[in-house]
Amino acid sequence: MTRFPTHDKKLKEWVNKMAALCQPDDIVWVDGSQEQKLILQKEAISSGELIQLNQEKLPNCFLHRTAIDDVARTEHLTFICTRRRRDAGPTNNWMSPRTAYRKARAIFKGAMVGRTMYVIPFSMGPVGSPFSKIGVELTDSRYVVLNMMIMTRVGEAVLRQLEKEDKFTHCLHSKAQLDINKRLILHFPEDNTIWSVGSGYGGNVLLGKKCLSLRIAIYIARKEQWLAEHMLIMGIESPNGRIDYIAAAFPSACGKTNLAMLVPPDGLKKKGYRIWTVGDDIAWMRVDTDGSLWAINPETGFFGVAPGTNSQTNPNMVETIKKDTIYTNVLFKPDGTVWWEGADGEVPSEGIDWQGRPWKPGRLDAHGRPILGAHPNSRFTTPIANCPSASFRLEQHHGVPISAIVFGGRRQHLLPLVYETFNWQHGVFAGATMASERTAAQVGKLGEVRRDPMAMLPFCGYNMGDYFRHWLNIGRHMQKPPRIFHVNWFRSDEKGNFLWPGFKENLRVLEWIIDRCNNKVDAVKTPIGYVPRPQDIDMTGLELPKGTMDKLLEVREEEWAGELKEIKKFFKQFKKDLPAELWEEYENLASRLKSYE
Ligand code: OXD
Ligand code: MN
């Protein structure tokens, strides 16, 4: 292969400059071909980066193990590096670009000696679509290259597009020593640049994903008047054949991936409902000439959490990950397949755990806790194209039209199963005040409410006050804005038992949402928004104890005093950067609650 298969001057200069810093033995350009992929897989197997799984049972599947202190996104080592601290806002870690480059340069210096530097030209979104953005990632990890080939569009066509646009996000990654004390995930939105060093974990190193498609894209999106969001996109086909698309944001551990590809429950399947999956994590949305909001998923793969994935919770994912998948930090079984806590079938009697140690079920650690076979954040990277519910519009350059935006959180009390906001501004307020209670899977006090506006807290690459203002502005540019809803699958009874079964049954709520969008159903006006009449949630094939639906939909004004206080506290940290419209919505809500009988 030619060493520089491009005539783009800026790209060539940058690659040379970064190579001079990292000093790789060799530079290889990734062309996206099957031949090159096979070579990389072979090399990764011999270097130990990948373990080949049983090719009869799991064709083209591999296992990778990360370092044991490199198993999740490291938010405390993730920085937004803008010239002014104010531009990163109160919710981000900030470092000045000068300090950030200096610190990282010292770690990158010579980090690739004895290694190959791979140059990965990639497109987020279909190559050449008005939505799409191009990035080039330089990395010394074959694992990164192979994952990027699943998660993004990689190769020659991207280079040709890059040459036309002469613009790309500069993404530099090195594993360096995989030392947590020399790990930095740095974003330079003003330079369209990402530097990630010292990690091998997907969320930190597949730079097209959280780093480019959220933290950098959101900055570009503000300048170019569009939205880059942490949202799934799914199409809901109704019995009459019409497909309505929704985009939905939930904080982690609220079932975004499961919802995006649900299989309708029997009652609704018989009626003719069907789901089309566009994406499970990221939505790029822009106002089109028809005055409505259109969206694409910029990715081509899922980077899903393995534990808890089974035929009950997510049958479509179980099908998807049977081939062409890279597993990370799951249990390796003696038959060359994999397992995780909450997988289908029997618990294996032995295996090699995610840390590479012999494992048997039932063993306890020094604190008396079960030793897990798979890390709780173990993952799979797998192509969307293999998903049985993959949308046929994945490659469409104009994306899909969005009928509804859905926000959600995990709340035991307070929030009804679903409500519709009164208008765009009120919907932005609902998104900006979104919150979830901590589960055992997160560090912190159990049950504590954490605000996570639009599920973007860890991904908002600039001042969140400006971000809210941008949302309000986008609303003003749409003649036909999507309606905005809020859902809560987690409302519980006095004993803490969930009132709603969740998972595929959630489609019943989406059906109501779509009916609202199509003006097919009435609703009850409450101080927080429009709530369904109990009889309007289709319960064909699902029985709940008497009175449950009333409890699920109830708005209890006496519970709201504490919430209003929390919202106020949260808003105050943005000082004058919080748009006045959100204070206005706050006051409106408070007074509606006051006069509620
Ligand atoms: C993810 C996340 O991995 O949101 O998608 O953390
Ligand atoms: Mn995510």
Image (cartoon, rainbow, N blue to C red):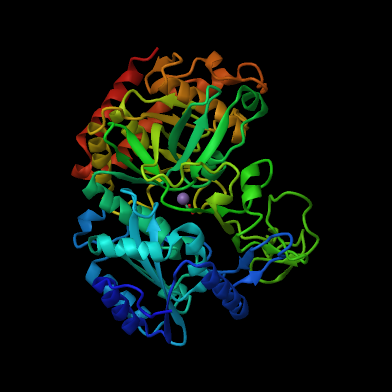
> Residue 259: x percent and y percent?
54, 39
Q: Which quadrant: the C terminus?
A: top left
Indicate left or right for 582 with 493 as reference: left
Towards the viewer: 458 or 155: 155
Residue 319 in sight in this render: yes
Residue 315: quarter of image: top right
Q: Which quadrant: the N terminus?
A: bottom left
Towards the viewer: 441 or 402: 402
> Residue 258: x percent and y percent?
57, 42
Name the residue rendered at 22%, 54% in the picture. 87
**Image label count:** 0
Towards the viewer: 536 or 290: 290
> Residue 487: x percent and y percent?
47, 31
Q: Is residue 574 above or below residue 151?
A: above
> Residue 294: x percent and y percent?
35, 38
Q: Is residue 5 above or below residue 343?
A: below
Residue 517: quarter of image: top left
Towards the viewer: 361 or 188: 188
Name the residue rendered at 28%, 47% in the picture. 464
Residue 91 in sight in this render: no
Name the residue rendered at 67%, 61% in the picture. 59
Q: Is residue 398 above or below residue 325?
A: above
